[in-house]
Image: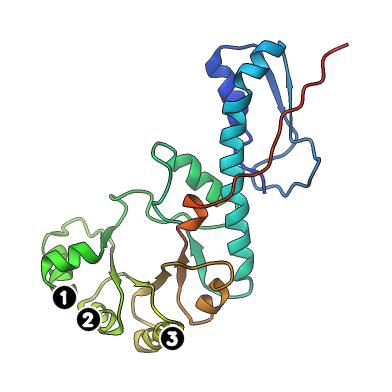
Amino acid sequence: MIAGTAIPAEVYRQFGSDVVVTEHVQDGDRVHTGQDLLTLAGPAREIITGERTALNFLQRISGIATTAAAFAEAVTGLPARILDTRKTAPGLRVLDKAAVAAGGVSNHRLDLAAMVLLKENHIATAGGVTAAIAAVHACNTRGIAVEVEVDSTAQAIEALRAGVEWIMLDNMSIEDMRYIVTLRGSEGPRLEASGSITLDTVRAVAETGVDAISVGAITHSAPAFDLSLLSTPAS
């Protein structure tokens, strides 16, 4: 799955070069070994100067898109959505999340302002799940959606009673997730599964009935896409 196809042209633009980049594919296209993805035309010195920078971006971004696509395909036919996380490379979040979208996965929580997210340290500092949620509700004058991370059925039950828009089930067993889905019913908050989810386990997690599954590995551990730039001197 290719992504970041507009980046090489921007790399050479910022170099101030005369290299012309022609794109033969678009973000989200499936590509195969040996396929020509882009053609660069211009002075050899300028092309080679920008080669590694352009390839580094394309390899990272296409690797993320390919990994995202694999996770999306793994839950085909089930209602659970795959989500990304904020575990992106510093300074590259916008590009990383664009790559995720190209791979068919939903962007979630672009930054800390997008949603109130109560994690284990917030809960410990506040004195528990109920106390942490109450503290947020007391000052959430803008009505920003609240999500709380829980790691046990007891904490999940607290969150269900306290009233939030999202509950993240962190590193919970398949059995516990099914139980929380049953308790939630059809009118409760959305349930997000998270924590060490792999391609081998993601479908079983989706089958519990959770609404979403967040996978940090899509952005923080995607293998680089194998790409190369080969020169053909003009005759």
In the figure, is residue 179 to the left or right of 149? right
Quadrant position of the C terminus in the picture: top right
* Residue located beneath label 2 in the image: 158
**Residue 209 in the image: above or below residue 67:** below
Taking the spot 35% from the left edge, 84% from the top edge, the residue there is 184
Q: Amino acid at mark 3?
A: Arg
Taking the spot 51% from the left edge, 55% from the top edge, the residue there is 218
Q: CA distance from mark 1 to mark 2?
A: 6 Å
Q: CA distance from mark 1 to mark 3?
A: 22 Å
**Residue 57 in the image: above or below residue 128:** above
Numbered label attached to residue 178: 3
**Residue 85 in the image: above or below residue 39:** below
Residue 217 position, x and y percent, is 49, 57
Taking the spot 27% from the left edge, 80% from the top edge, the residue there is 160
Numbered label attached to residue 130: 1
Q: Amino acid at mark 2?
A: Glu
In the figure, is residue 32 to the left or right of 193? right
Q: Earlier in the sequence, mark 1 or mark 2?
A: 1
- Packing grade of label 2 (10 A; few <14, some 14-19, many >=20) is some
Residue 146 position, x and y percent, is 27, 64
